[in-house]
Image: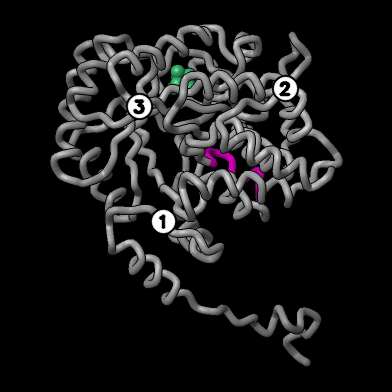
Amino acid sequence: MKIAFYHELTTTSLQGALLSDACCEKILTGSDVELLLLLDAAYQVRKTYFQNEVQLHILNNAQNGYCPEDCGYCAQANSATTDIEAYPLKPDAEILEEAKRAYESGAYRYCIVMSGRGPSPKRVSHLAELIRAVKARYPIEVCLSAGLIDVASAHILKEAGLDRLNHNLNTSEAHYPNICSTHTYQDRMETLQAAQTVGLACCSGVIVGMGEETDDLIKVAKALRQLEVASLPVNFFLPISGTQLSEFDTETQRSVPTTLTPDYCLRVLCLYRFLNPRAEIRVAAGREHHLRSMEVMALYPANSMFIDGYLNAEGSTASRTLEMIRDAGFAVKTDNEDTNQLNQEEVAKRDVLLKELKVLRPRMTSNT
Ligand code: SF4
C-alpha cells in the first residue's frame, strides 16, 4: 500500500471525518496494509490528543457471581460452569481500602465493577454513598459498572460525584443474540443514553473474538463514535473454561474459535483509534493472552491500560506494566508522585538468577 494511504488515515481521523466501511475492512484484513505503518498512522492521532501519556485503571470486582444473566463470554454468568469464588457486595471498608491501594499504585481511575443485571434503588443509594466516600478521601477518578441503569439512578450517581459509567456494547446489534439471550443490545444502548441524559461521561467498549465478522467490529466502532464515548475499552475474548462461548455446543455444533493473532488485535486497536480519535482507548482484558510479545505495540494506538488483572482472570503485575510503559518511552498519567519511586524500588530489588550446575551440565552424574 502506498505511503499516501497511511497519511490519509491520519488526516481523515484528525479532521473528524468518517472512514468508509471498505477502508475499515482494508485496515483489518488487507494483506498489503503494513502493520508498522498502520501503527505509526494511528500513533499520530493518539499523540495529537494524548501525547505520550498512559492512563492506568484498576478494577475492583466488588461483587462476583450471583448473576441471573447469560452473557456467553462471562465466567460469572448464570449459564457458566466456571469454578469462580462468588461473593456478594464487599463491605464498604474493603472497597475503600482497595481505592487507597489503587491510588497508591498510580492508577488514574478506580473502577468499581459489580455483577448482576442492574442495581435496585436501595443499592443505587448505597453505591452513591460509597462513591462520595472514595471521592472525599482520594484524588482519583471513579468509574462504576453496575449493569442496566435508568435515568433516575444515573442522576443519583452523578450527584454523588461519579465520573464515568461503564456499560460495554460488546458487539454489534446483529451479533448480540449469539452472545446473550437475557438482555439486548438495545437495553445496553438505553443505559448509555440514560447516562448521557444526566451528563455522565460514558465508558463503553467491545469484546473482540466472540465469533463476530469484521463487519460487526466496524459497526460497534461506528456506534461508539456516534455516542461520543469518553472511554473505550477494547477487550480480546479470554476463553475461560466453563463460559458458554468457550465450550463446544453439541446442539449448534459450534464454539468460538480463539484464533486472534497479535497482528489482528493491533489492527483492531488502530481501527478503533481512527474512528474514535478523541476517546481514551484502553487495551483491556486479553492483552497479555492475545498480544503476547507484541503487547507493547498496543501503546501506539491505545492510551490506557488496566493493571493488576481483570474481573476473573489474572493479568500482568502493576510493576511489570509500569516497566513496559516506561521502557517504550511513554509516561504514566497520575496524580500520585510516588508512583515513579514505587516502580524503581521494584526494579532495583530484582536479582539476576544464575543458572545452576544441573542446568549447565545436565548429563553430568553425581559420581563423575
Ligand atoms: S457480563 Fe455482567 S450481566 Fe453479563 S453475566 Fe457477566 S456479570 Fe452478569
Q: Nearer the viewer, residue 194 or 256?
A: 194
How far across and down, in percent of the image, does residue 115 sit? 39, 23
Q: Earlier in the sequence, mark 1 or mark 2?
A: 2
Question: Which residue bears the numbered disc 3?
Answer: 201
Q: Disc 2 to disc 3, how far (Cα)?
A: 27 Å
Q: Earlier in the sequence, mark 3 or mark 1?
A: 3
Horizontal relation, residue 199 to residue 183: left or right? left
Question: Which residue bears the numbered disc 2?
Answer: 21
Which of the labelled discs sits on residue 332, or is there none? 1
- Give the farthest residue toward the bottom: 368
How far across and down, in percent of the image, does residue 130 sit? 19, 31
Quarter-wise, where is residue 117 in the image? top left
Q: Which residues are magenta?
A: 283-292
Q: Disc 3 to disc 1, how far (Cα)?
A: 22 Å
Q: Is residue 287 magenta?
A: yes
Q: Is residue 148 magenta?
A: no
Which of the labelled discs sits on residue 200, or is there none? none
How far across and down, in percent of the image, does residue 88 sit? 30, 25
Q: Are marks 3 and 1 in contact (CB under 8 Å)?
A: no
- Hey, what amino acid is under mark 1? Val
Say above or below: 303 vs 21: below
- Hey, what amino acid is under mark 3? Ala
In terms of secondary structure, what is the magenta stretch mainly? helix
- Hey, what amino acid is under mark 2? Asp
Q: Residue at (77%, 24%) from the top-left corner? A: 22
